[in-house]
Amino acid sequence: MKKPQKTYLTRIPAGSAAAVHLAVVVACIGLFLLVVRLFPVPPAVDPLEHWRIAGDLSLYSKGGVMITVYSVLQGLEPHIAAALVNTASFAVIGILLLLPADVRKKTLQTQYLFTAVTLLLGLWLSGFAPLVATELPHLAFGLLAIRIMIHILLNGPSWLAVVGAAAAGAASVSIRLQTMLPVLFILTAVSGYVVLKRIRLTRSVVACIAVLILSVTGGRLIDAVYRMGSQVPERLAAHEMQVALNGVTPGQCGLNTRAGTAYLAEPLETGKGVPQAYVELFSQQTPKDLAANYACKLDYWLSLRGSSWIMVSRHLNPLYSEDFEEVRNTNSSPMIRAALHLEAVTGTILYLIMIVLAVLLFKEKRSSLGRLLLLGSLLLFSGYTMQHMIIEINTRYIVPPMVFSLYLLLYGYALRDRSVKKIAEGSEKSVNK
């Protein structure tokens, strides 16, 4: 009996589909560089804080491993340093959207779907190109960890794969600590299901769970090391308090606004902890106010009112606002207004692709690897959504859950002919249906 061939997700495919995909990646990088050339914006708000911390690590409050990267680039102009980081990150993302050769040969049209998504992502994320932001590096490290975990599920674990995935995951988590809660949500859901169903876990599944745990603990440890050298503990406390209280500040829709900062003074002066201050502010509101706040945040979360280009607009305009309509109507640049509309259109198309893929994978057999990745995508997106219903929300916070979830759905669709039956029963190899 012929043994099933392993699917190595590290193999680079050859042929016209791969060439077209790489050409699209190069074109998107060219678009990023064009954006940097047209909008060499000075850093402001969060990017300005990242740049200042990179210049003086004693000011550390957030950013993880990317602070070290930007500190190495301090001799450059901020927008040039940002261009190097963001184009390299998108190049990694584009390569990770290149299907392995043996999968591509069976589903050639799927590679073109991956390529189309790459183009849409390039358009959607292009506004980040000149910004000293952390979103694209966070995505690059996170997607690398996810791809290695899919490799582990298909081919069994190895020390190199587990360590590589955990390192990439830890780097991603350290850049954005808010990723910890969605990952912990996935771990809790999986653990509960395993206990209730009394499922016997195999080495591949245990290895993936270990990667998630190591990613969370490693990312938190990296951040803790940076915090040990921080000389501004009050900045750390204020940042954590702000992120939490913005989520429940009345009338602010969870946004970080100047009006919302008034609620920070009393807790910081009295030395209250974040949980106590949050509960007190929460209890001061009526059920009607809370319902209105959550409805507004959910609408804001799902309506794609802008992510990267709204930040470019804020850098060029003294207006400090997260409201898409306000920024669009007050910005005098036709190019910015057009970019905001293009961002909304491409984001909506990506949303529709996610929905279609989710429906198609839901129709697959329960033993399909596609169904497993669909579950992972739903848990991840739900975890992010519930988190931001509690804490601060922002126009760009939708980027990580959308990209991570879309990546899982894309690979679920590409590998929908694989079965997880033997993985569940104890074999380390997946087989065709």
Image (tube, rainbow, N blue to C red):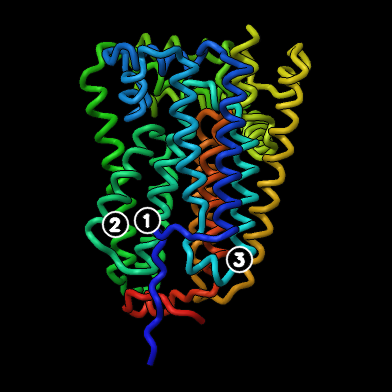
- Three-letter amino acid code of the residue under disc 3: Leu
Kindly give the residue lying farthest to the top in the view shown: 318
Label drawn at residue 148: 1
Q: Name the residue at 62% across, 28% down.
A: 286
Of mark 1 and mark 2, the one earlier in the sequence is 1
Distance of mark 1 from mark 2, alpha carbons? 6 Å
- Three-letter amino acid code of the residue under disc 2: Ala
- Three-letter amino acid code of the residue under disc 1: Ile
Q: Name the residue at 36% across, 14% down.
A: 74
| Residue 276 at x, y percent in the picture | 39, 26
| Residue 315 at x, y percent in the picture | 59, 13
Q: Quadrant of the N terminus?
A: bottom left
Q: Which residue position holds label 2?
A: 161
**Does residue 74 appear to the left or right of 370 in the view shown?**
left
Per the image, label 3 sits on a secondary structure element best described as helix
Report the front residue among 297 and 131.
Answer: 131
Q: Which residue position holds label 3?
A: 108
